[in-house]
Amino acid sequence: MASPQGSRAPLEFGGPLGAAALMLLLPATMFHLLLVAHSGPARLLGPPPYLPGPEVLWSPQTLLLWLAWLGLQAALYLLPARKVAEGQELKDKSRLRYPINGNPIYDFFLGRELNPRIWSFDFKYFCELRPGLIGWVLINLALLMQEAELRGSPSLAMWLVNGFQLLYVGDALWYEEAVLTTMDITHDGFGFMLAFGDLAWVPFTYSLQAQFLLHHPQPLGLPMASVICLINAVGYYIFRGANSQKNTFRKNPSDPRVAGLETIPTATGRQLLVSGWWGMVRHPNYLGDLIMALAWSLPCGVSHLLPYFYVLYFTALLVHREARDEQQCLRKYGLAWREYCRRVPYRILPYVY
Ligand SMILES: NC(=O)C1=CN([C@@H]2O[C@H](COP(=O)(O)OP(=O)(O)OC[C@H]3O[C@@H](n4cnc5c(N)ncnc54)[C@H](OP(=O)(O)O)[C@@H]3O)[C@@H](O)[C@H]2O)C=CC1
Ligand SMILES: CC(C)CCC[C@@H](C)[C@H]1CC=C2C3=C(CC[C@@]21C)[C@@]1(C)CC[C@H](O)C[C@@H]1CC3
């Protein structure tokens, strides 16, 4: 098994201090969001209305249910009826390096092992998609059913949030293979960030809009709902168009759907797209994802900031992720990447950023 970073790799996420702060802040933020979403004032920035005692936080039934959920997902993951896809070539073809005095906090956060596996069971790849993303959809559905029980039928806002996020998760599962080329799989280890992120952060904070709607019903008329659907459709069109264009091009550059696009050759033999979606900004897929994030919050109205937490968090995550990807691409492609940045100066939002 390989280590994701050599001994001289630059530290990311603010190094050990940043990693330690994130490991305290992330679980605290997740609990805070859930507590305030259930409270009357639902203030994103206010103190939580109450602090639950240990009897609320610990229940053997919940632990059993969670283990059963993970076990079910693991059993499905191990089913032999599946396609086997090849991952990206790893960077660690060279000799392993063993840093002395490694940094335990930083390493615990980012993970030392790039591909922890027992036989063919790949822990990181398994966690990235299945338990958390499908768990998110199930939590949303449970909240929709609870709303129906409470108020006779689910609200239009709840339908929209459920529908949009189901589309997003369905898309991720349909294009499952594309996850193999993300930096989470090729670059980051499997540490606190991805284990907590995949298994806790995604299902519990990505379902925040539905949690909020259950406790704070919002009136939503058909005209506004149609505008929100249109925003989600535009976001999805950009997100899917950009991701598919890059994936098609990476698999087969002479595919007729991408063969006419302009490219920049690089020293590695790979080419960079410089027209089509990837000629508009350097991360068109992030732009589409952010537009969808906005459409998921709008059904919750504008009376509270809390449902917009996802938009704020996701903007920060993607800006940081874009900067990390930029560094990695500069290392991979050198001058060709600089030329790409010159030809396509904006990162995510045309003429703004
Ligand atoms: N909901 C969520 O919480 C999150 C969602 N996402 C979504 O996941 C998806 C994947 O994101 P992510 O892995 O960050 O990044 P990308 O899918 O954008 O992949 C970046 C890589 O694409 C290649 N690339 C960059 N520019 C070009 C170009 N011009 N032509 C050809 N190839 C290029 C480079 O790799 P190479 O050259 O090696 O192919 C680069 O490292 C996105 O849609 C994102 O929005 C991401 C994070 C969190
Ligand atoms: C808890 C931390 C602040 C950050 C944790 C980050 C993780 C939650 C995300 C890192 C990259 C992710 C990706 C996805 C989900 C969220 C995490 C795991 C997708 C699977 C979402 C669906 C997309 O179609 C693909 C994404 C790949 C990256």
Image (cartoon, rainbow, N blue to C red):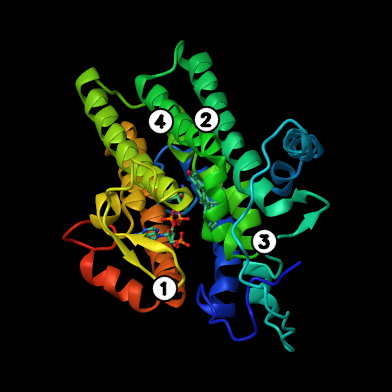
CB-based contact (under 8 Å), mark 2 and mark 1: no
Please tell me whether residue 293 is drawn above or below residue 222 in the rendered image: below
Contact, mark 4 vs mark 1 (Cβ under 8 Å): no
Element marked by disc 3: loop
Residue 102 appears in the figure: yes
SS at mark 2?
helix
Asked if marks 4 and 3 touch (Cβ < 8 Å), the reply is no
Q: Earlier in the sequence, mark 4 or mark 3?
A: 4
The image shows residue 74 at horizontal and vertical percentages of: 76, 39
Three-letter amino acid code of the residue under disc 4: Phe
Sequence-wise first label, 2 or 4: 2
Q: Residue at x 74, y 84 (%)?
A: 98
Q: Which residue matches tag 1?
A: 333
Q: In this view, does 210 lie to the left or right of 105?
A: left
Give neighbour class at mark 1: few <14, some 14-19, many 20+ (Cα, 10 Å): many
Circle 3 residues within 10 Å: few <14, some 14–19, many ≥20: many
**What quarter of the picture does the C terminus occupy?**
bottom left
96 to 237, vertically: above or below: below
Q: Is mark 1 within 8 Å of ligand 1?
A: yes
